[in-house]
Amino acid sequence: MEHTSLLERILRGAALTLVVIFFMFPIVWIFMMSFQTNETILRIPPQLVFEPTLANYTALITGKLMTAAGTLDIAFMRNLWNSVFLSVTSVAVSLLLGVPAAYAFARHKFRGSEDIAFTLLSFRFAPALLVLLPLTLYFQKLGLANTYVGLIWVYQLICLPLILWIVRGYFEDIPADIEYAYRIGGHSWFATFRKIALPLAGPGIAAAGLLAFIFAWNNFVFALVLASADKQPVTVGALAFITSSGIQYGQISAAIVLSITPTLALALYAQRYLVEGLSLGAVKG
Amino acid sequence: MTAVVSQRHKPSGFRISKRVLPYVLSLPALLVCIGILIPFLTSVVYSFQRYRLSQPWARQFNWGDNYISFFTDPKFWNTLKVSLLYAGTTVVLELLLGLAIALLLQKRSTLNNFISIMLLMPLMTAPALAALMWKLMTNPGFGVLSYLASLIGLQDFRWASSPSTALFTVVLVDIWVYTPFIMILLLAGLRSLPTQPFEAAALDGVPRSFVFFRITLPMLTPYILTATLFRLLDSIQQFDIIYAMTQGGPGDTLTVFQVEAYLNFFQSTNVGRSAALMIILWAITYFLSNIFIKNWLRLRERARGQA
């Protein structure tokens, strides 16, 4: 149908190849580094062919790092667990709070509803440190400093606006007539919500949850400011790990690989919903 | 089971009136967030105070002094300059690159879909971790990029550790992470455009540059605006990449707003100055987000209309 010259096809192919190399190379390279010993990593020129080793991963998983000077403890598994726990709990709390609110905003136009919805949205765009820095002082007074409860509360700033605005869109897509028909059958609003609205919006809610999980996992600044070593997720832990372990580059790479794998895997799984989630429901994929 | 069924037909004693229901449903979400509004107000108060954590006894209101001193403070002007430069460069480059890639991938094919999914991976990498990845690759001792730079004659290219190339390096990481964001939004936009204008143009033999500038670009504008404003809002507040890569250094080369406020708070413990910086940044983002929300809403209504 379309006439494209050979030259144009070659140029397009070359451009796409460059794009793929630029965006994929860092991930591939760090992945390769994670299977190398420090000696091969430090070799110049960098090696493309090497004897792969699992030593970096075993050191991280057992938490013991053998060095010439002796054995070093690595707390990286603790960071990984913190990331899992903080992200899962934050998303669960966000879903519990956000889904009913999203339903209210979608189905009932009540006084102040748009204002409230936009206030929640504006949290997504305000500078994080604006609230985080005074919050450190408050948290110390309230005894919430360096606690999971405090962190999960603050993580709502990431998860709630996302869940609210995406799920709201899915509820709006359900024709109201279906719900009316069910209510006329003598069912309460709660039964309607549970039996009709929730299942129909189910895939959207799941997608919003996955995306909120990715954003919570990838967050850095909240935990940097509010958590000490034992509560820090991988994003903050990996940075501390670089300073403390000095030159253990293989282990650092392995730690990075373990830290980014969950979000990459989830993103591939949820990629159909990614466009909608990233634009907070403004663009459909 | 029977009890549940019979209850359904009986008017139950506990029933929430229709007017109150939406408030009851949205109240918990709101309450959780209101707790966050208090620190915001505290920030405003701090910004009008002389407040150093190291000298709590000297804490007092100095009203506008924190703000007025900015005018003669070269560090503040540096912060403003670097923040705007960072945001401007990243957004313009990411927009051009993202649009180019979206156009390359526009046609639906297995290969194009596969590539567009692959390109999402940098976007799903935590920005702080992405910065660490690039830090490893630009290490002067063994970094593969330092080696490649030396191959093309840049013998002592210092990446983020030299003041002259630090901005370039963090902008590069930002481009790596966030170009896919613009790409994926514009790709969705391109693929949702109506086909008739393009078929008509092809039938009339209209030159392709004309089609691009007079049909594609204007129809894509709402998507471009939303994607750009989204990025601009995030980029002017960038913290993760810069902090993880250089902590704002070398010197004060990269002390953008949030990094400078963080360092002011935790290193020089100057809470007043830190809060004033954040209020100025908030004013900038508030202005931008008002423009943003109008565009975003328009696009959202369009997307919902299609459903």
Image (spheres, coloured by chain):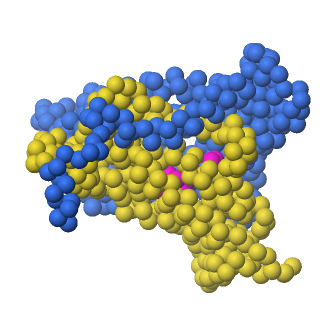
Marks counted in the figure total 0
Quadrant (top left/top right/bottom left/bottom right) for the N terminus of chain B = bottom left
Predominant SS along the magenta part: helix
Is A219 magenta? The answer is: yes
Quadrant (top left/top right/bottom left/bottom right) for the C terminus of chain B = top left
Nearest to the observer: residue B194 or residue B19? B19
Give the left or right position of residue A142, taking residue A94 as reference: right
Task: Using the image, determine if residue A232 lies above or below residue A110.
Answer: below
Q: Position of residue B147 (x, y in %)?
A: 68, 61
Q: Position of residue B110 (x, y in %)?
A: 27, 61
Give the left or right position of residue B124, taking residue B277 as reference: left
Nearest to the observer: residue B286 or residue A97? A97
Is A75 magenta? The answer is: no
Nearest to the observer: residue B84 or residue A228? A228
Residue A140 shows up from this direction? yes
Q: Position of residue B130 (x, y in %)?
A: 59, 55
Q: What colour is chain B? A: blue
Chain part drawn in magenta = A213-222
Give the left or right position of residue A111, taking residue A226 as reference: left
Chain that appears yellow: A
Q: Residue at x 29, y 56 (%)?
A: A203
